Image (cartoon, rainbow, N blue to C red):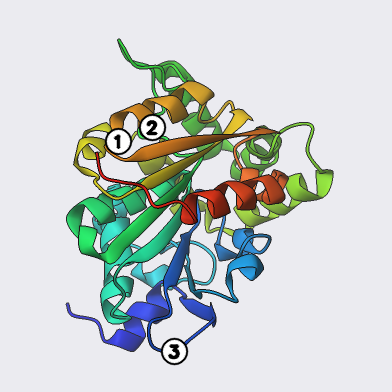
Amino acid sequence: MNLSATAILERSNVTISGASGPGTPAMVFLHGLGADQASWRLLVPHFEPDYQVVQLDLVGAGGSALTEYSRERHGQLAGHADDLLDVLRTLALYDVVFVGHSVGAMIGVIAAVREPQRFKKMVLISPSPRFINEQGYAGGFEQKDINELLAAMDADYHGWSQGISPVMMGADESPELVMELTNSFVRTNPEIARHFARVTFLSDTRAELAFLSTPTLVVQSAHDVIAPLAVGHYINEQLADSRISVIETGGHCPHLSAPQQTLAAIDAFLQQDLLPG
């Protein structure tokens, strides 16, 4: 079924702010698991004077059209990448700066591999192409750990949300930020959240990395148990044109726990012309 332009933008709850006019570059933000576009509030104002800022919600999250969430289409990250590309095509966007967090970062990678002309630079915040340890790869979790995490989510979603939020945000970070993330999880439809969590934690997008040619910045928390430092270095090493910036903060969300350091890393990256190869 072909959706209208309006339906595509409503499906992903697209919001547009910032600069406008011919030649204005676009910056596109995509959040991660349990969040929505509100999680970018500490970064977006910094870029609005110079960029057309496009924010969207993953279908199934935030203000997106929940009825458009499909277990078939969204049973793999590629379905979410299709949603992202639908938005970029509808807005006729090319050469965007893409900023993605966690699984949203990897969704962006898939989209950029498929249609590289739409992406000028990539900022991947706390990305992970694979959460499960395998021989020669340290993802941070054993298979049994992921099985237990998903089982706990199935058994008591609200309790799980309260337990995972301090881990994701960082136990030493602001209690207000931990509560914000908890509330974001709780607002998400539990059935959709459980399904998307399973898709996220069981995904493996390592093979995509070899095909990403877009200049990329990996923003990595120094103390992240969800996507450990080794994962950030792995991604940086696998990409053809990449650099990594390690932020001295805890948790999985440096754009919330250390926004000024994150902005400084992104600014430095955007101001540097990276040569291919």
- Residue at the spot 59% in from the left edge and 43% down from the top edge: 157
Q: Amino acid at mark 3?
A: Gly
* Quarter in which the N terminus is drawn: bottom left
Q: Quadrant of residue 252?
A: top right
Left or right of 232, for residue 163? right
Q: Amino acid at mark 1?
A: Leu
**Residue 126 is at least partly visible in this image:** yes
Residue 149, image x, y percentages: 52, 29
Residue 9, image x, y percentages: 38, 79
Mark 1–mark 3 contact, CB under 8 Å? no
Left or right of 13, for residue 5? left
Left or right of 217, for residue 116? left
User: Which residue does the numbered mark 1 point to in the structure image?
Assistant: 239
Q: What distance separates the C-alpha of mark 3 from that of mark 2?
A: 34 Å
User: Which residue does the numbered mark 3 point to in the structure image?
Assistant: 21
Mark 2–mark 1 contact, CB under 8 Å? yes
* Quarter in which the C terminus is drawn: top left
Q: What distance separates the C-alpha of mark 2 from that of mark 1?
A: 6 Å
- Residue at the spot 25% in from the left edge and 58% down from the top edge: 73
Q: Amino acid at mark 2?
A: Asn
Query: Badge 3: few (under 14), some or many (20 or more) residues near its Cα, within 10 Å?
Result: few
165 lies above or below 225: below
User: Mark on residue 236?
Assistant: 2
Query: Badge 1: few (under 14), some or many (20 or more) residues near its Cα, within 10 Å?
Result: some
Taking depth in this image into account, of 96 and 169 the one nearest to the observer is 96
Taking depth in this image into account, of 218 and 55 the one nearest to the observer is 218
Q: Secondary structure at mark 1?
A: loop
Q: Secondary structure at mark 3?
A: loop
Residue 72, image x, y percentages: 24, 55
